[in-house]
Image (cartoon, helix red, strand yellow):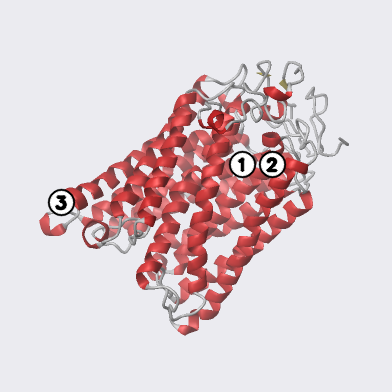
Amino acid sequence: MSGATILVRPLTPVPESGNYLTAGRTIWSWLTSTDHKRIAILYAISITVFFFIGAAAIAVIRFELLTPTGQYISDDTYNKLFTLHGVVMVWFFLIPSIPNTFGNFLLPLMIGAPDVAFPRLNLFSWYLNIAGGLFTLYAVIAGGVDTGWTFYTPFSTMFSNSHVLAAAAGVFVAGFSSIATGVNFIATIHMLRTEGMSWMRLPLFVWSLYATSLVLILATPVLAVTLLLIVAERWLGLPIFDPAHGGDPLLFQHLFWFYSHPAVYIMILPAMGVVTEVITCFARRRVFGYDFMVYALVAIAGIGFFVWGHHMFVSGQSPYASLVFSFLSFVVAVPSAIKVFNWTATLYRGSVSFEAPMLYALGFIGLFAIGGSTGLFLASIPVDIQVHDTYFVIAHFHYIMVGGSVSAFFAALHYWWPKITGKLYDEAWARFAAILMFFGFNFTFFPQFVLGYLGNPRRYHVYPPQFQVFHVMSSTGASVLAAAYLLPPIYLIWSMRWGRAAGDNPWGATGLEWRTSSPPPLHNFLNPPKVEQQPYAYHPEGRGPVPGSRTPYRTQDQPS
């Protein structure tokens, strides 16, 4: 196997005032910056705030579910809390978490560009996201929303007395933020790749952002139109979903899930890209089957548009349509399985080291495998009818979205933290947090598979007493999981003040982002890089760098 070499002209030292963190320290300079790195930090701050708002809502819910009688909060309050949790976590944390933070920060660096294609649009997309979040928070402060995060009709259009319009407006505005980001990323990847960076030399994280962006710009307008139809019926009285006036309530479900199932891949595709970057680095081995990994990413994005009907097996749709959607739901699992196989093959015979990013990445593989395999149960019509709207669905969803996406988010955070800040965190605490999160997550959500199999419906805070032991296990696990989420902000913030200098490439990685200073300068590279061969220039047998490569960095098995 031939070696891969990335050539970069020699870098001159970057003055302290020249990196993106120190060039203008006022709040106004950050709020008006068009630097993609600063905008990524702004996104990171805002999604962290939304994460803790959503987490606070679920903390109250898990405390309530410790007992089967529903003695602490009312039915209406419970409905509003799980709606708040779902809306905030899906649209203001999970969807923007990796693309808008690490995607924004790393995409230009990874392709050798000075910035994204449309810097002002990039900043505007953050303001749109914040505006959408404020609409949603207004709905909460004004009294809450009780429809669930799916806004199902006719409840959302006719019967709910809560602030549905404000919440729907918030999600509507946030959707345009996602569209703007998708357009920006696609234009950047097409137009701003550095010399020699061909399509099949792109890092797989960049490919994952490209596939995600395609889904964003094709699926999100459907959600926007769907939310406008809710406003039209609820506010203007147009008979769109009301069957008494010729409307069709199932139309909403078709439109909503046409967006919302591809939205699952908006959350998981960037996570797959992150895990690929981490595994190849800490296995010291080139990605097994690079071409197949690319095709699998694109296939997941494409096939994901044709499986929305598996959410509607009990909604009265045609049995023939159900058979087709069931078949396609099994088909979309194939490219996902290819990726798990290729990650495993990359680890095989590699010089694997277990730093914190690698532990998070391995945790992702385990949790994603459980979530994906249980998705096959839900793709089977008889099983789905049995466990529909039970805790089985909640467990499956969270294994993919929370276990998968959040594990990858923390893997990315720990992997690129030295590049973002120029500082090293405490490795022992980071490893402990990664292990704690894996066990806390399984302790929280695996009992919910049992609850769903036994028939405990979701969205109820009063349940038969025989289910209490599983709810207590789940709530106890949630406490462990909360501790695992709280640890990283503590030691990462500590590292910014007292952490050791990271150097430009502490992991001995091969991407272009590691060829510039840490933190990066304002325009990323003092001299444009030139790419000559394939990515991931690790030894084919996992023993460090490719023999004879001229990459100016130390490897994992070399002293600093």
Task: Name the amino acid type tagged 1.
Answer: Val
* Disc with the residue nearer the chain's start (1 vs 2): 1
Do the residues bearing badges 2 and 3 touch, measured as CB atoms within 8 Å? no
Task: Say what secondary structure mark 3 lies in.
Answer: loop
Q: Residue at x 76, y 17 (%)?
A: 12
* Disc with the residue nearer the chain's start (2 vs 3): 3
Q: Nearer the viewer, mark 2 or mark 3?
A: 3
Task: Name the amino acid type tagged 3.
Answer: Gly
User: Residue beneath label 3, please?
Assistant: 237
User: Residue beneath label 1, please?
Assistant: 274
Do the residues bearing badges 1 and 2 touch, measured as CB atoms within 8 Å? yes
Do the residues bearing badges 3 and 1 touch, measured as CB atoms within 8 Å? no
Which quadrant of the view contains residue 419? top right
Task: Name the amino acid type tagged 2.
Answer: Tyr
Residue 536: where, in percent of width, then height?
70, 32
Q: Label 3 neighbourhood size at 10 Å, few (<14), some (14-19), many (20+)?
A: few
* Disc with the residue nearer the chain's start (3 vs 1): 3
Q: Quick check: 408 above or below 559?
A: below
How much space separates mark 1 and mark 2, taking CA atoms?
Answer: 9 Å
Query: Quick one: quadrant of the N terminus?
Result: top right
User: Residue beneath label 2, please?
Assistant: 415
In front: 367, or 377? 367
